[in-house]
Each structure stands twice: as C-alpha cells, then as structure tokens.
Image: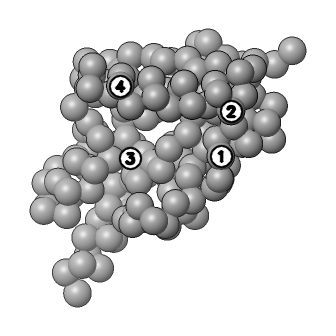
Amino acid sequence: MIRTAIYPGTFDPITLGHVDVVRRGMKLFDRVVIGVADNPGKGPMFDVETRLHMVRETFAGEESVEAVRFSGLLVDLAHQQQASAILRGLRAASDFEYEFQMATMNRRLDERIETAFVMAREDYTFVSSRFIREISAMGGDVRELVPEVVMGFLHKHQESLQR
C-alpha cells in the first residue's frame, strides 16, 4: 500500500522552507501531494495557476511529489488523493497552537487521517511567504530563501507594480 500525505498551503510563493518540509515528508511517505489552495479571499500575490506552476517546476523530476489545486475541505482532498496523512511543518512554538487546532479539527472530520508534523530546519524558521512578498516588494534580496523559479515571478510582479 502506498503511503500518501497531503501538504496543503497557499504557497504564495513557495519558499525553501516549504521545500524542506516536502523533502522531510518524502522520507516518511511514498507520495507527497502538494495541495495548492485556491483561496482568493486571502488576496494572494499570484493566481493559483502561477503558484501551481512554481511548485511543479520546483519539484520537476521528483516522481513521488505532485501538485494539485484544491478548494474546500482538506479532508476531502485527502479522500480524493487516497491520503492517510496531512503533512505540516512547524517553524517555532508559535506555529504549534494553530497547527494543533487544525489537526484536531481535521481528525474530528475524519479520524482515519493523521497529521504528521516535521520541524523546519533552523535556517528556515524565520521564513514565510508573507515575508518573501514584503521584502521582494521593497526590493530586498530573497534569492537564498526561495527556489530559483520563484525569482522570475517575483521580478515580474515587482516590475508590474512599478508601471
């Protein structure tokens, strides 16, 4: 039986912290499905198709990793993908309370789906998509915090703001 985990998020944009969580998940699961949330209410910088593209390019060549678009309940995506677990990364103790609440609610919705937490590498404990967006918008250098494919999209976005 293939052990599949869902790694959900907006990935706006994907960061090296996200990549680290997926790589750690690949050690625990046979297949990791990255669920890119289509949540326009969050006001993402990039549309869902662009975010999907960035994620897919980041993991091109990784047969055990795929990315799908989703909206709605995470447990429904888990059912669709025949996943037995939800993969989540923890950067700091402050993440734990929110993640604990989410894991508890997801277990309430379907007790067969477990949540697996992995600790972020120390290098990435401070990295968030929000910081990447803000720093990039102000002209800061984020090259060491995001996959190479993301840089092109950040530059295009910054140029569009300057017009």
Tag 3 or tag 4, which sits nearer the N-term? Answer: 4
Determine the secondary structure under disc 2. helix
Left or right: 130 in relation to 104:
left
Alpha carbon separation for disc pair 4 and 3: 32 Å
Q: Is 74 situated left or right of 95 in this image? A: right
Q: Position of residue 143 (x, y in %)?
A: 25, 45
Secondary structure of the residue carrying tag 1 is loop
Task: Tell me which label, 2 or 1, sits earlier in the chain.
Answer: 1
**Residue type, label 4:** Glu
Residue 60 badge: none
Ranked by sequence position, the earlier of labels 3 and 2 is 2
Identified at 57% across, 31% down, the residue is: 105
Distance from the alpha carbon under mark 2 to that under mark 4:
19 Å
Residues at discs 2 and 1 in contact (Cβ within 8 Å):
yes
Which type of secondary structure does the marked residue at label 3 adopt?
helix
Q: Which amino acid type is shown beneath numbered disc 1?
A: Leu
Quarter-of-image position of residue 25 = top right
Which dot marks residue 73? 1
Mark identifier at residue 109? 2
Pick whichever, 138 or 155, lies toward us.
Answer: 138
* Image quadrant containing the C terminus: bottom left
Residue at the spot x=45%, y=23% of the render? Answer: 100
Residue 104, given in percent of the width and then of the height, sits at 54, 24
Earlier sequence position, callout 3 versus callout 1:
1
Residue at 32 percent across and 61 percent down: it is 154
Residue 142: in sight, yes or no? yes
Q: Which mark is residue 97?
A: 4
Question: In the rendered image of this protein, does residue 30 appear above or below residue 158?
Answer: above
Residue placed under numbered mark 3 in the picture: 148
Callout 2: 10 Å neighbours few (<14), some, many (20+)? some
